[in-house]
Image (tube, rainbow, N blue to C red):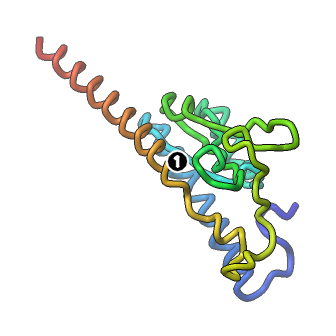
Amino acid sequence: RTLWGLPGLAGLDAIRVCAANQLIRLVCRVADKCFAHSVCYYVESPLTSRRRKFPCIPRMWKQHTCLGSRFDFCQFGMKWRKAKRILCFNNPVFARSCKKCVFQTGYKCSATGQRHIQLTGVDKASGQFLTNRAEAYPPRLCNLWAKCLQDICVTEYMAARNRSKSTYM
């Protein structure tokens, strides 16, 4: 009922909701175009995001036969879990590279053995909201994603090269 925004929003809140709604529509149109041309695409969202409830997302999962990958920031050197879900089309390497935390006894992180920092409140030392502090993607995660993208680009390039060679032989 409120997927497209709360009723009665005004001012900056209404503008933000309108912009977010336009963005999800654009993402879905771009994904459809990529699918039509067999081009890889990726849609990132927080694990608990309601974005997956927008009508186009379940349709993409089903019609485009997308794979979902979960990446927890704690597995890439962060002290907080902050889980991200990536909807991935046409890149099985990326989909297989996911890493998620498997809690140990006492809800301890499987990577560090420590409890995760909860992203609520303000960091007393800096005065910064903890959610803001955790916005940046971990460098190790970015490196992994770059490697996955490189791998699929090289794979597709080599496949296209081999197809063109066989055409001329």
Q: Find residue 6 and report its image quarter.
A: bottom right
Q: Nearer the viewer, residue 118 or 66?
A: 118
Q: Nearer the viewer, residue 110 or 138?
A: 110
Q: Amino acid at mark 1?
A: Leu
102 relative to 29, above or below: above
Q: Position of residue 131 (x, y in %)?
A: 71, 68
Q: Find residue 163 and report its image quarter.
A: top left
116 relative to 164, above or below: below
The secondary element bearing badge 1 is classed as helix
Residue occupying the point 72% across, 38% down = 110
Q: Quadrant of the C terminus?
A: top left
Seen in the image, is 52 located left or right of residue 165?
right
Count residues near mark 1 (Cα–Cα under 10 Å), then give few for <14, some for 14-19, many for 20+.
Answer: some
Q: Position of residue 82 (x, y in %)?
A: 70, 54
Q: Position of residue 117 (x, y in %)?
A: 76, 59
Q: Position of residue 133 (x, y in %)?
A: 64, 69
Q: Find residue 61 and report its image quarter.
A: top right
Seen in the image, is 166 located left or right of residue 72?
left
Name the outermost residue toward the bottom. 11
Provide the residue designation for mark 1.
141
69 relative to 25, above or below: above
55 relative to 8, above or below: above
Residue occupying the point 16% across, 18% down = 165
